[in-house]
Amino acid sequence: MARYLRDRGGGVQASIFGTYIHKGELLVYPFVEYTRDRNREYQPAEFGLGPDVNFRGKFHGSAGELFVGYGVTDWLALEVEGAYRSATLDKSPQDSFATPGRIKETGLADIEGQLRARVMKESDRRPELFTFAEITARSQRRKLLIADPVWDLRPGIGLVRGFSWGTVSARVTGEWNRMDKHPDFGEVAVDYLKRLSPRWRLYLAIEGGEGGAMDEWDFVSGLQLRLTDFALVKLDNAVGISSKATDWAPQIGVMFSFP
């Protein structure tokens, strides 16, 4: 194996940090997530109960999620993902409008699929180039905290480069700004992956910009512990590094690989 593939093994980069999908490999990843945000931005107008004025409320939520990925070829991979979410928002003390004091929603949400393809392989002189398309299904249209009100398609492009000190990748997503009717940059992510030993891998990332807003950024750290050839424990911890980002979002799960 080439030295620049040491950390990742040459698969197609998945949407999940630190994960690559190989030809003929089926990945099944059930995991749980907790979310806490002491200053979640909202507007009473979203609930039809006041003006379009920004307030900051307290938010917390949890989810059981399932990710499935499959390597169709050595350059093409497919993904599907969904979650059952519970979300609660407590209104701001400054909000004097008719917004309910507490809003709680539960249900199936975040249903999406991705097509991910390697366009150009990495070599000694150039990085790997990949592209992807993410489709989000419409769900929970009558809710606000967990809703995806419309079908959405977001294309993207990225680069991966392996070094002796680790592997670095960067990607950017494009999306359609429905309010202003023009294309826009979406989520941007830069991550670092390092194989510490045959059993342990470390990854670090900065991501943000989802929805076209460049004021929500997270720092993500994580560890992978390989238990067997077919299973590994994955621990993630996301911390908001801007005021509008979610304060804290830890995840834990077990990823199964079926070759």
Image (spheres, rainbow, N blue to C red):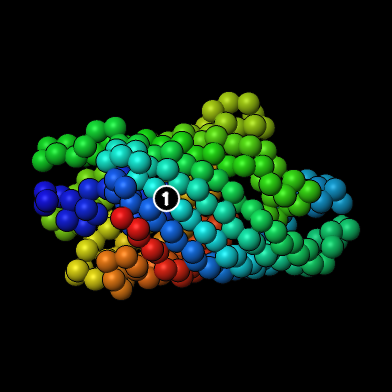
Question: Which image quadrant for residue 179?
Answer: top right
The residue under label 1 is which amino acid type?
A: Gly
Relative depth, front residue between 4 and 232: 232
Query: Residue 173: percent from the left, percent from the top?
Result: 45, 38
Query: Residue 182: percent from the left, percent from the top?
Result: 58, 26
Packing grade of label 1 (10 A; few <14, some 14-19, many >=20) is many
For the point 38% across and 53% down, which residue is it? 26
* Element carrying mark 1: strand
Which residue is under mark 1?
Answer: 69
Question: Which image quadrant for residue 93?
Answer: bottom right
Image height of 118 relative to 165, above or below: above
Image height of 244 relative to 177, above or below: below
For the point 84% across and 59% down, which residue is it? 99
Answer with left or right where residue 17 lies relative to residue 143: left
Query: Residue 193: percent from the left, percent from the top?
Result: 27, 58
Relative depth, front residue between 210 and 143: 143
For the point 66% across and 42% down, which residue is it? 138
Query: Residue 207: percent from the left, percent from the top?
Result: 43, 52
What is the quadrant of the C terminus in the image? bottom left
* Residue 13 can be seen in this image: no
Image height of 174 relative to 256, above or below: above
